[in-house]
Structures are given as C-alpha cells and as structure tokens.
Amino acid sequence: MTVLSVPDMSCGHCKASVEAALKPIATLVEVDLAAREVRAEGAGPEALIAALAAVGFPARVAG
C-alpha cells in the first residue's frame, strides 16, 4: 500500500476529487481528510502522484 501526503486536501469536495482521480487507476483508495493522507493500492506511487497533480492536488509519498 502506498501512503501519500496531500497537504492541500482540506474539505469534503477535495476528498471527493481525490477519490475520483485515483479510483480509475487504483484498486483501493482510502482518504484520511484529517491527516491529509491517502492510502492506495493497485498503482505505483508515480502514477498516483501524477493523477493527483492532474486535478490540482500536489502529493508526495508520506514518511
């Protein structure tokens, strides 16, 4: 599982946008809005980061 930090994610609309961007490429997407993190499986970190960047949410691998 890949854990990404998405610092610009701050509301329910942001959460929905992040989920919509990742669901086509990931088999599992879990968004923790309070921690501003996303956990995803089924795609590599580079693909996940690129998908989020395409919808305006810069991300990086957490940790």
Image (cartoon, helix red, strand yellow):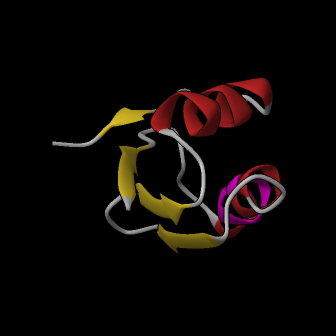
Of the pair 5 and 33, the residue shown nearer to us: 5
- Can you tell which quarter of the image residue 49 is in? top right
The structure residue drawn at horizontal position 61% and vertical position 62%, both measured from the top left corner, is: 11
**In the drawing, does residue 2 fall left or right of residue 58?**
left
- Residue 33 in the image: x percent, y percent? 47, 67
**In the drawing, does residue 45 fall left or right of residue 26?**
left
The structure residue drawn at horizontal position 59% and vertical position 59%, both measured from the top left corner, is: 42
**Magenta segment main secondary structure:** helix
- Quick check: 33 above or below 54? below
The structure residue drawn at horizontal position 66% and vertical position 26%, both measured from the top left corner, is: 50
Q: Is residue 51 at least partly visible in the picture?
A: yes
- Quick check: 53 above or below 30? above
- Residue 52 in the image: x percent, y percent? 67, 36
Q: Is residue 57 at least partly visible in the picture?
A: no
- Quick check: 9 above or below 39? above
Q: Quadrant of the C terminus?
A: top left
- Residue 1 in the image: x percent, y percent? 38, 62
State the count of labels.
0
Is residue 3 found inside the magenta-colored segment of the image? no
**In the drawing, does residue 14 fall left or right of residue 31?**
right
Of the pair 20 and 27, the residue shown nearer to us: 27
- Can you tell which quarter of the image residue 13 is in? bottom right
The structure residue drawn at horizontal position 52% and vertical position 63%, both measured from the top left corner, is: 41
- Residue 9 in the image: x percent, y percent? 54, 49
- Can you tell which quarter of the image residue 34 is in? bottom left
Q: Which residues are magenta?
A: 14-18
